[in-house]
Amino acid sequence: MEKLIHDFSVGLFIWQSVIFIVLIFLLKKFAWKPILSSVEDREEGIRTALDEAKAAKEEMAKLKSANEDLLKEARAEREAMLTEAREIKEKIVTEASTTAKDEAAKITAAAHESIKGEKEKAMVEIKNQVAAMSIEVASLILKENLSSDANQKALAEKYVNDLNLN
Amino acid sequence: MEVVILQRFLNTNYCLFVMQNKLVGKLLLALMFVFTMGATANTHSEPAGLDEDARTKAEIKEGIDHHLIDSYEFTITHGVSMPLPVILIDNGVHIFSSSEFHHGESIVEKGGNYYTISHGKIYKTDAAGTITYAEPNSKGDVYVSNEKPLDLSITKNVFMIILMALFMFFIFKGVSSSYNNQLPTGAGRFLEPLVVFVRDEIARPNIGEKYYKNYMSYLLTVFFFIWFLNLTGMMPFGINVTGNITITFSLALITFLITNVTAKKDYWGHIFWMPGVPKPMRIVLAPIELLGVFIKPFALMIRLYANMSAGHIVLMSLVGLIFVFKSWLATGPVLGLTLALSVLELLVAALQAYIFTMLTALYFGMAVEEHGDH
């Protein structure tokens, strides 16, 4: 202890204390304050950035789920539309085929009708023609046969015979 | 002669301190050269009349003692030293170069007073250079009893403190202006984590969020000041600033003053009227607690002083062993041991700076602690 007291130097103590205290204030002004504030600013910046990133992530998740909902809705809508379209298509096809069948039947019926009419007309025509021709032939034959008395007699006889047979 | 080799070894074998900042490095180098210009040769008187072994040991002890104490000249290497200014206040201010003492061999006369150097200190004396000694104390130590002038000399330690203050100022000012987009560049990349360490590991946990900012400047300055000076102690040139009781006393005193000046009501309440104990006990505890107020900074002072001095003594003693053994066989193991202890000392340099700062923060924490009811 005595050695320590003996080692103590007043001059060195004064120098050390003065220089050190001045150093504290100089460093405080020119170094520690700017350094610590830079560090704090940076830490604050990092904290804010992290918070923002977290918020953005949450926002993204929200958006994603919203997107999925939208997609699901759209899919359902498409499905519905497709089903409807299919139904409409079937309906149209069915309707069309029904209409076509009816039309075809109508046309066929009309055709039959007209064919039948034409046929009857043709039959009448033919009957008339045949009757006229028959009369012509009959008149020609009669003219021929009745030109002689003998023939007339023969014919009359023949008719009488035929009648007798009846 | 051995001491010559010992000192050369100490001066050359330590790793060189890497300059963090080119500008500061150049400045320091320039200063070195300016002062080396005035360097003078140095001769040592060898103690005579002893046998060789005893003389070797005496020389080693003298070398170690000489290394540990403050000096009026800055020894660059053995035989080359630069004188430093002596400033004495004794009936006026006397400023002169320490070279006038011729390494303690001459008596200097200024303003009618005579001065001489004995054991690294300037004493007033007479024209014949008489030195009187006090009665030996209980341990048999003898101290000079001559009157001392107020000695404000720029000694080796003062010179180192000034250099260190300049070095720290430029380094940390450089760091503070090196911030680019909130990120440090250059030396700041290495020093900023240490600043953050002092803040987050020392100040915040011990002082608390509320008050720690008030103490940051002192804690940071004291941490880097002690650490850097401990490291300069590992350099050549025999610098031993933090192993000097005056320096550690000054640092501990500042801690003591800040602690007690900034202390809150609860701190004093705990010292003089300890809550939560019976009344008679409070009266017993008060003087003990009051003593603690002084013991805490005293322990800070002794711890730093003893650790740094011990490191220097152990390292130099180990190197001294080479000369005691007088055998080359001893050199290898001794050098290995010295290297290992040097590495340990590097750790101690940082550790002691940490402990001093840490305990200082702890005392500040006690001073500003706000207790709820017990």
Image: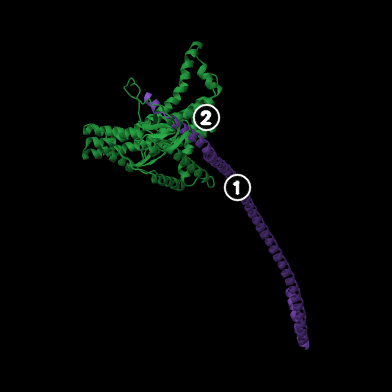
Q: In this image, A163 relative to B199: left or right?
A: right
Percent across and percent down for residue B132 are 35, 25
How far is the residue under mark 2 from the one under mark 1?
Answer: 48 Å
- Residue at 72% across, 69% down: A116
* Residue B337: quadrant of the picture: top left
Amino acid at dot 2? Gly
Mark 2, Cα crowd under 10 Å, few <14 / some 14-19 / many 20+, is some
Amino acid at dot 1? Asn
Whether callout 2 and callout 1 share a subunit is answered no
Instruction: State the residue in front, A116 or B271.
Output: B271
Q: Is residue A110 visible?
A: yes
* Disc number for residue A67: 1
Q: In this image, A4 relative to A60: left or right?
A: left
Q: Say which element carries label 1.
A: helix
Q: Is residue B301 above or below residue A100?
A: above
Q: Farthest bottom residue? A: A148
Q: Colour of chain A?
A: purple
* Disc number for residue B208: 2
The mark lying in front, picked from 2 and 1, is 2
